Image: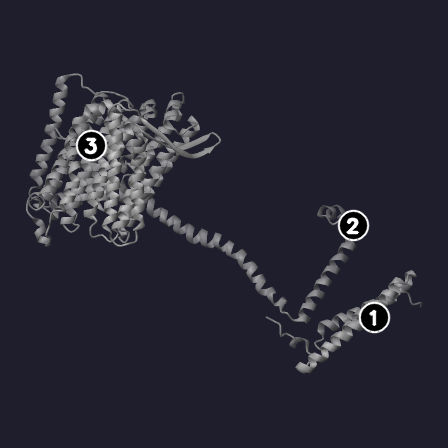
Amino acid sequence: MEIGLNHYLVLSTILFAIGLVGIMRRKNLLMLFFATEILLNSVNISFAAISHYYGDLTGQMFAFFVIAIAASEVAVGLGLLIVWHKRHGNIDLDLMSTMKG
Amino acid sequence: MEFYLYLALFAPLTGSLFAALFGAKPKTLLTGIVTSSLLFVSFVSSSILLGNLLMGGKVVHVEMMTWMATGDLYIPFGFVVDQVSAIMMFTVTLVSTVVHVYAIGYMDHDKSFNRFFSYLSAFVFSMLILVMSDNFAGLFIGWEGVGLCSWLLIGFWYHKESASWAANEAFIMNRIADLGMLVGIFLVYWNTGTLQYSEAFANMKGLDNHILTLMGSFLFIGAMGKSAQFPLHTWLADAMEGPTPVSALIHAATMVTAGVYLVVRANPLYDLIPHVGLMIASVGAFVAIFAASMALVNRDMKRIIAYSTLSQLGYMFVAAGLGAYWVALFHLMAHAFFKALLFLGAGNVMHAMDSELDPFKMGGLRKVMKGTFIMMTLASVALAGIFPLAGFFTKDMILEAAFVEHHYIIYSVLLFTAGLTAFYSFRLVALIFHGEERYKLFGIHPHEAYKYMLVAMSPLLLLAIIAGWFKMTYFEMVTQLLPATEYHIHSVATYWIMTIGTQLFVILAIVYAYKKYQVAKQDAEFEKRLCYKILINQYYIPYLYNKVLIEPYRALSAFFWKSVDQKIVDASVDGIANIFYSTGEKTRTMQSGNLSTMLKWMVAGLVALLSLAVVFAIAVRYSDGVNPLLSGLGVQ
C-alpha cells in the first residue's frame, strides 16, 4: 500500500484532535504548551503534505515559519511560566485567576 | 375697552397664582385680601364693559393669540364681550367678589385658607374663559376648568371620606356629560367647518335637520351634566360637602348655570330645531318639580337649597327650551343673586351652629342672628317669587312664556312647583329662625357672623330685591343679540288673574309652611309613609345608580383586574421577561473566566459550525430542491 495524501491528512487530523483535547482537559500549564505544540505540528504535517502533493513549495515554507514562531512562542511562554512558578509555586491553570472580578 | 376685557379676565388668574404661592403655608390674611381685591377689579371692569354695552357701545371682540392653526382648523384664543357674556361676566364677578370677601370670614379658622382662595380665584378665571370665549373650543377649556375647580373645591376637605367621594362623583358625572359635549362640538366642526360661534351658527342654516338635531342633543347632554339635569343630577346635592362659599358660588350661582348659558349661546342652533327645544323644556319642567319634591322633606339645610337650585335650573331650561332665551338668562342672573345670598346665609347659620345642618335642631335663631334672618327671609321671598322682588319678574316671565307658547302642561307643572318652592323655602326659614330654641338642648351657643361678612352679602340682598325692576333695560340690551320675543298674554283679565292667582298660591304655600313648622315636631306617623320614604331617599335614584351601575362596574373592574390583567396581561409580559432572565441566569456560568471552560465552549462552537457546514454541503450536493430555498434565504 502506497502512502498517499489522505494518510497524512488523517494523521494530521488525529494529531489535531489529540492537541485539542489536550488544551481542553489539561490544567498543567506545561502540558498545555505540549498540546499547543501538537496542534501546531499537526497543521505543519498537513502543510507539508499538501505542498508536496501540489508540487508547490509555499506550504513547506509556511511550515518553517510556523516552526520558528512556535519556538519563539514557547521560549517566551516558558520564561513566563518559570517566573510564575517562582512566585506562586505552582503552574495550575485554574489558580491563575488573580484578575477575576 | 380691550384693556378692561383683559383686566376682567386676568385679574382672577393673577390672584389665584398669587394665593398659590402661599398654598402650603399657614393662613395668611394677605391672600384673601389680594384675591378679593383683584376680583373686585375684575368686577369693576366687567361693570364698565356692561355699562358700555348699555350705553349702546360696540361689542368688544379681541383675538389674543392663535391657539391652533393646522390646515383648515383655525382656533384662536378669542374673547368676545357681547350682551350675553357681559351679563354673565357681571353676575359671575359680582357673586364671586362677594363670596371671596365672605370667605375671608367663613374660612377664618381653616388651616388651608390660602389654598382655598387659590382654587376659588382659579374657578372664576375658568368661568370667565367659559363665558367670554368666542368659540366652542375656548368654551370647552373653560368648561373643563370649572369642572376641575369644582372637583378641587368639593373635595377641599379631602380628609373627609364623604367629601372626596362627592368630589369624584361630581367629576365623573361631568366627564360622562362632557363626552356628549365633545361629540356635539365635533359635529359642529365637521358640518360647519369652524368652531367660531358667529360663523358656525351662520353655516348651520343650510344643514340637514337630522344633523342639527344630533348637534343640539349632544350639546344639551353636556349642558345636562354641568347643570345637573335629570338623570345626571345626583352629584349636585352631594357637592354640598364642599365649604359653603363654594356651594354659593359654584353650585348655585355660576358653574351650574353654564349649561343654561350654553343653550342661550347656541340659540341660533336651537331655534332651528324646536323639537329638541321642547325636549329641553320638558326635561327642565320635570327636574323643576322632581327636585322641589325632594326638597320638601329633606333634613339637611344645604341639600334643601341645593335641590332648590336644581329646581330653578329646571325653570331656566324650560325658558331656554321654549325659545325664551332672554328670560332664561334673566332668571339665571336673578337666581344667582338670591341663591348665593341664601347659601351664604346658610353658611352663617352653620357657623353659628357648629356646622349643624339639621334645621330641626335649630329654631328661634332670629333673636341672635338678626342680619342673617332678614337676608335669608328676603332671599326666600325672592326665590318664592313674591312681588316686587327679583324672583317675581323672572319666574313669572317663565310661566307666561310657557302659557303663551300653549304648553299648558309645562305651565301647570311650573305653577305647582312655584308653590312647592315657596313651601320648602319657608319651611326652612321657619325651622331655622322661628319657633322654640331647640338648639339649647344640644348645648350650642349661636352667634352672629362677622359684621363684614354681612356687609359683603348686602350687594346680593340689594340685587335680589331690585334686579327685576330693570327688566326693560335688560330686555332692550340683550335682545340685540337674542331673539326678542315678548311674551304678553293677550287678554288683560287673564294676565291679572294669572299673576294674582300665582301670587296668592305662593303666599298660601308660605303661610301653610309657617303654620306647619312654627312648632317643629317630627311627625313619626308621616315618616312611616311610602311617599316620605321615597322623597327622603331621593326617589331611590342614588340607591339605584349604586346597585345598577356602580356595583356591577366595580365587580367587572375587579374581574378584569384579577383575572384579565393579572393572569393574562401581566403574566405574559412577566413571562417574556422571565424567559430572558432565566436564560441569562443559566448561561451565565459559561462566562466563568476559566480558560479551559472558555476553550471548551469555543471548540463546541467550532464543532457546531463545522457540522452545519457539512450538513449544508451534503444538502447542496444531493438535493436540487433545496437550492431555491437556500437562494431564498440568501445563502447562495
Q: Earlier in the sequence, mark 2 or mark 3?
A: 3
Q: Amino acid at mark 2?
A: Ser
According to the image, label 3 marks what residue? Answer: B334
- State which quadrant residue A38 falls in: bottom right
Count residues near mark 2 (Cα–Cα under 10 Å), then give few for <14, some for 14-19, many for 20+: few
Q: Can residue B533 be seen from the camera position used here?
A: no
Q: Amino acid at mark 1?
A: Ile
Q: Can residue A11 be seen from the camera position used here?
A: yes
Query: Farthest top residue?
Result: B491
| Circle nearer the viewer, 2 or 3 | 3
Which chain contains the residue that carries disc 2?
Answer: B
Q: Secondary structure at mark 2?
A: loop
Picture coordinates of residue B78, whole percent (x, y): 37, 32
Picture coordinates of residue B454, whole percent (x, y): 14, 42
Number of numbered discs visible in the structure rendering: 3
According to the image, label 2 marks what residue? Answer: B623
Picture coordinates of residue B216, whole percent (x, y): 35, 28
From the viewer's side, name the closer residue of B535 and B38. Answer: B38
According to the image, label 1 marks what residue? Answer: A67
Q: Amino acid at mark 3?
A: Ala
- State which quadrant residue B582 falls in: bottom right
Count residues near mark 1 (Cα–Cα under 10 Å), then give few for <14, some for 14-19, many for 20+: some
CB-based contact (under 8 Å), mark 2 and mark 1: no
Is B37 located above or below residue B571 in the figure?
Answer: above
Left or right placement of residue B68 versus residue B21 in this view: right
Left or right placement of residue B374 versus residue B321 in this view: left
- Please determine if labels 2 and 1 lie on a single subunit: no
Inter-mark Cα distance, 3 to 1: 111 Å
Q: Secondary structure at mark 3?
A: helix
Picture coordinates of residue B620, whole percent (x, y): 78, 51
